[in-house]
Structure formats: structure tokens, C-alpha cells
Amino acid sequence: MNIDFILVNFNYWICVILLLIGLFTTIAKENLIKKIMGLNILSTSVLLFLVSLGDIEGGAAPIIVPGVEVDIYVNPLPATLVLTGIVVSVALTGFALALIIKIYEGYGTLDAEKLIKG
């Protein structure tokens, strides 16, 4: 594998690494808070991937200004999706942590295996 290929696609490699870390943490850990942290890492990798897709080198914001000629515009849709994803991720994390607090108050543990066994 050529080093230039790795350096040019560095952000995509980071996305894959974060995705694998988040997936492993979500699946392998028994603590519910660690599972939520894994989900956050997983969602961050997806948002980073969307930002990476929307980037165009030399591209300008899609705002038409009289007298300024631009050949390449950046697509604003990935940035919009990322902002929406951030809001959903924060809301999901807050809801999950509230549920985890109630689970701990009711059962006295955050271990998923102990909760399944009853």
C-alpha cells in the first residue's frame, strides 16, 4: 500500500478506526455507560465521514455574490445532516443516561449481564 494513498485518505482511515472502536465498545463492554460511550464514538465516526464527503478542495460556500466568479461550490447538505446528527446524538445520549440512572436506582447495577439474568 502506497504511503500517499494513506495520507490522502487519512480522514477516511480515522473514520474507520473510530467506527471499529465504537462498535467494539458497544458490543464487548458490559457496563451500560461504556456502551453509551461506544455509541457516541460510533456516531462521531459517521458524522466525521459525512463532513469528509462534503469537503471539496478549493470549493467555496454556495453563496452567490455579484462580481465574484467561483467554479466549484461545496455542497451544504452534508453539513446540514451533520448538524442534525449532532442534535439527535446529544438527545439520544441524554435520554439513555436518564434511563441508566433509573435502571441503577431500580436494580442497583449497571452491568448488562446481571440485568439480563434478573
Image (tube, rainbow, N blue to C red):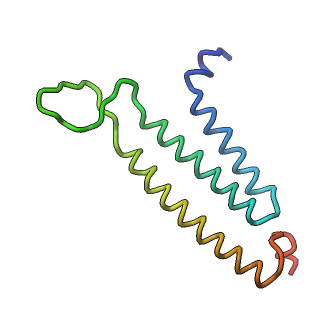
Q: Residue at x 57, y 32 (%)?
A: 11
Q: Quadrant of the C terminus?
A: bottom right
The number of numbered badges drawn on the structure is: 0
Q: Is residue 80 above or below residue 10?
A: below
Instruction: Point out the residue furthest to the left here.
Output: 66
Q: Quadrant of residue 67?
A: top left
Q: Position of residue 68 (x, y in %)?
A: 17, 26
Q: Position of residue 20 (x, y in %)?
A: 70, 44
Q: Quadrant of residue 95?
A: bottom right
57 to the left or right of 32: left
Q: Residue at x 77, y 85 (%)?
A: 106
31 to the left or right of 53: right
Q: Is residue 105 above or below residue 42?
A: below
Q: Position of residue 56 (x, y in %)?
A: 39, 29
Q: Position of residue 82 (x, y in %)?
A: 46, 50
Q: Quadrant of the N terminus?
A: top right
Q: Quadrant of residue 39?
A: bottom right
Q: Residue at x 69, y 57 (%)?
A: 37
Q: Is residue 88 above or below residue 96?
A: above
5 to the left or right of 106: left
